[in-house]
Image (cartoon, rainbow, N blue to C red):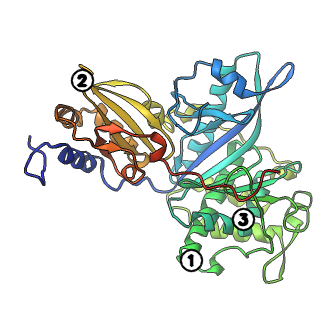
Amino acid sequence: MGWPTRTGRAGSPADLDRAFAALLGTPCDQGARVGIEHEYRVLSRGGVVDFREVIPGLDLGVPHLDPRDAFGFRRPSGTWLTCDEAEAEAAMPAVRLGRGFGDALASSAAAARADLEAILGPDLRIEGFSTHINVSAASDRRHDAAHLFARTFAPALMLLMDRASSPGLLVRSRPGRIELGGEFVEGDTLVVAALLAAGGARACLARVEGRREARDLPPELAVEPAPEWRRYGWYVDRRAFGPDLYRDGRRALLTSRRGERLTAQSQLSAAWRSARRELPGDLDRGDLERVDASVSGERRLPLEGGTPALVSAAAAASTGATYGSAIRPRSRGAFDLGAVLATWELSVFVVADRARSRLAFACVPDACLDRFLALVDGGRLDALIARYLAAAPVGRVLDDRAHAQRPGLWDELGARRSLLQPEIRPLGARP
């Protein structure tokens, strides 16, 4: 078979790279996605345990797949298990906003918790510490969108997530996503919060990009959230709006930037109307009705004493199948393949011929990962990769974020950090 060529040399590394990208599809797109990070306090009979001291002694799988995280491991389930200071953190595979979203999200979180409990065994136990909802946002305006979220949707999300004892909400702009951190929630309460967060983040992005009018969002409130010191973003305290939001709940009186007085309940209702317009049309009716019930008061909020209906972990297998499968080494006759980088943004695989005389690297953006693994396992990349390994290296080095925006084959791998979008310096000083 002769591969398409622009140089007249069929099968040159550049031609094979273009053929690889064409087979995976460029651009790749999975639509809007939501990923959950759950933090857990680890406890023994003697009290709180620093998970940073525990995790090195656990047999968790392939280490060092993210150069920014010295503690992180990708589990066979697809969950990323690491530490956030002293707490254990489980970052679940992102779930596409669409049919089956609620069950996939809640069951994935339940499975990750069960996996961590099994790893720790009978001498250690865990209790929920916090939840971070990540909404995919590739836009360069996500920083502005996150700040707008803090001034519009924050009290609504705080009511849906937090308890009477909670401190407040974190709103952060992260590489490729907007992160919203609050109280630990699971089950259907997690689904409710995630849908409001996802729709709200998307509404704010649409507003700052000029695709929505101000009237399409809930009223902007007279609040200036505090700069956050751990990550780039803001902290919205329970008293940031004047009254104690968690004490007064739905009855709390807020003030808009125009000087109007409104209840937290009216802001919650307006936020859900706005968020719902930004959600895809193939969401399950039951997922939307969960939010409807929480907003209307038919279902009690966590600070009102509401408890979540929990979801079985059994349905989670397919949710993380791609991410768990990605770390499994593969032998394909003429070559072997294994992951050397696995993050929210992309994966990189080293490819070696059987003699180990030639290495190459396959760069796969996250949205293309499903298709890449299906093509590898189905043998549809065998001939192409074998031809790339048979060709003499020409010094093509994977070492720039621009390279990581599309699927590609490369001769060498540079510093892995150079492929990843850097964090922005925090706005606030450490207290």
Residues at badges 3 and 1 in contact (C-beta under 8 Å)?
Answer: no
Mark 2 → mark 3, Cα distance in angstroms: 54 Å
Name the residue located 45 percent from the left edge and 40 percent from the top edge.
416
Q: Position of residue 192 (x, y in %)?
A: 68, 53
Of the residues shown, which amino acid type is indicated by label 1?
Answer: Arg
Q: Earlier in the sequence, mark 2 or mark 1?
A: 1
Secondary structure of the residue carrying numbered label 3:
helix
Q: Nearer the viewer, mark 2 or mark 1?
A: 2
Residue density around tag 3, few if under 14, some if 14–19, many if 20 or more, within 10 Å: many
Residue density around tag 2, few if under 14, some if 14–19, many if 20 or more, within 10 Å: few
Residue density around tag 1, few if under 14, some if 14–19, many if 20 or more, within 10 Å: some
Of the residues shown, which amino acid type is indicated by label 2?
Answer: Ser
Q: Is residue 122 above or below residue 116?
A: above
Q: Position of residue 243 (x, y in %)?
A: 91, 66
Q: Is residue 276 above or below residue 401?
A: below
Q: Which residue is mark 3?
A: 150
Of the residues shown, which amino acid type is indicated by label 3?
Answer: Ala
Q: Which residue is mark 2?
A: 357
